[in-house]
Amino acid sequence: MAHHHPASRRSSRRDSEALSRRPSIDPSRLIPMDKVFQIPGSDDFNVVFVGAGNIMFGSDEGPWNHSFRFEHKLGPRLKVVALIDPNFDRATTVLFKKRETFVRSAYEKTRIFKTLEEFVESMLPRDRPRAVIVGSPPMFRGTTRPGRDIELQILRHFPGVALFIEKPIATGPEDEIAEAFKISQAIVDSGAVCSVGYMLRYLKGVQMIKQIIEDNNLQVMATIARYACAYEAIAKPDWWDKSKSCGPVVEQGTHFCDLSRYFGGDVDISSVTAHSLEWHENAGQLHKQTIDESLIAPENRIPRVTSATWKYENGAVGSFSHVVALQGRNYSCELEVYADGYQFKLVDPYVQPVLYIRRPGSDLEETHRFPDDDPFFSEVSNLIDVIEDIEEDPESATILSSFEDACKTYELTWAIRRASEKSRKNV
């Protein structure tokens, strides 16, 4: 039996309270980064970053950049005690850039290590982290196997320390899904605070839908999700290779499968059916790829369209279509949620979210825009508030995606891929 110290007992009590109601946050509490007051206090907040790539330090491809959000939330209290990445040169480069800016104090004593074990061996007591932020590639996590078990390493070396883990929690073979659920159980047993980076749950528009559903005691009847990517802008050969990235539904569609589950609840996995349009079929020819697909083995080339339907355990129906068809840069993504008398349509959640609501008693749609919403900041801000355990206001901070929740989303994306492969015509 693990011994919990008081903070972890408190967090496990809060977890059970959170599970008894659907986790949600009042959308008016999701405030932009420049309006947030940094938490007062002079004590350092030690953080370890695992991964020195785009997720952690930003890139031209999108708005993700966890370090930036931690800097804004914690201000001068942030101390990044270690940056862990086997690519020493990349880690050195990003640290150099940070030390040239006004956030230098967070990084001036950061040490680089190739593995977590190396850091643990040379760690001083004052370096003990309060949170470990895992943004390494998903093929290196989410299992119980040595070298791909970063979560278990963290639990072993830093019991009780909070975890933030990027999504998807893993991209491995289907038979490893059970291992992800084992890790989930280990995290629950440890009592550690853990948040997974399904940031779309933290959108104001998403929380507004949640609030209306809760306030009106509605039952969701259907979720319809569509994700059309701009393939011309996807220049990573691994993305086009199912043996490397697990295919577009597991690797990219995961956010929309997760958002569907957030509203529809648990999925009856045995009910998942799917069809795909494959690269060798007439309608599957693409003319503006920036990679050379002939270098990828035919059986590992990705489908152009995957379309799936399923039943939720409460009887509702879900559907998801992933489409590799658009050129240019901008993606086209929408989620619809239906309940008796209500239609919610969330458009372009990644860039400029717009929510259209049709309510009972009117055929007209209301339009809600959220110009300065930053779900990446909201997820980091909520995580820090939960770690700091600000108890005056139990409503304010909630983690919206647990590791177990993320495992269920991972399981759904794999079920969609598997169903689409079963139904396709052979090459």
Image (spheres, rainbow, N blue to C red):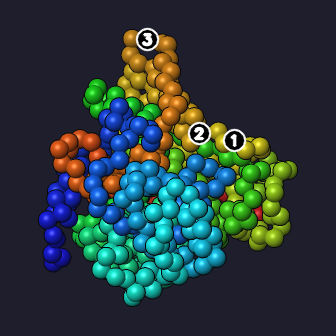
SS type, badge 2: loop
Amino acid of disc 2: Val
Q: Out of 85 and 328, give the one closest to the viewer.
A: 85
Measure how far apart labels 3 and 2 are at the Cα level: 29 Å
Which residue sits at x=60%, y=68%? 96
Residue 6 in the image: state x and y as whole percent: 14, 65
Which residue sits at x=18%, y=48%? 391
Q: Say whether marks 2 and 1 touch (CB < 8 Å).
A: yes
Instruction: Kindly identify which numbered label has been placed on residue 46.
Output: none
Identify residue for label 1. 330
Identify residue for label 3. 362
Q: Out of 282 and 66, give the one closest to the viewer.
A: 66
> Which of pointers 3 and 2 lies earlier in the amino acid sequence?
2
> Which of pointers 2 and 1 lies earlier in the amino acid sequence?
1
Residue 19 in the image: state x and y as whole percent: 24, 50
Screen quadrant of the N terminus? bottom left
Which residue sits at x=52%, y=46%? 256
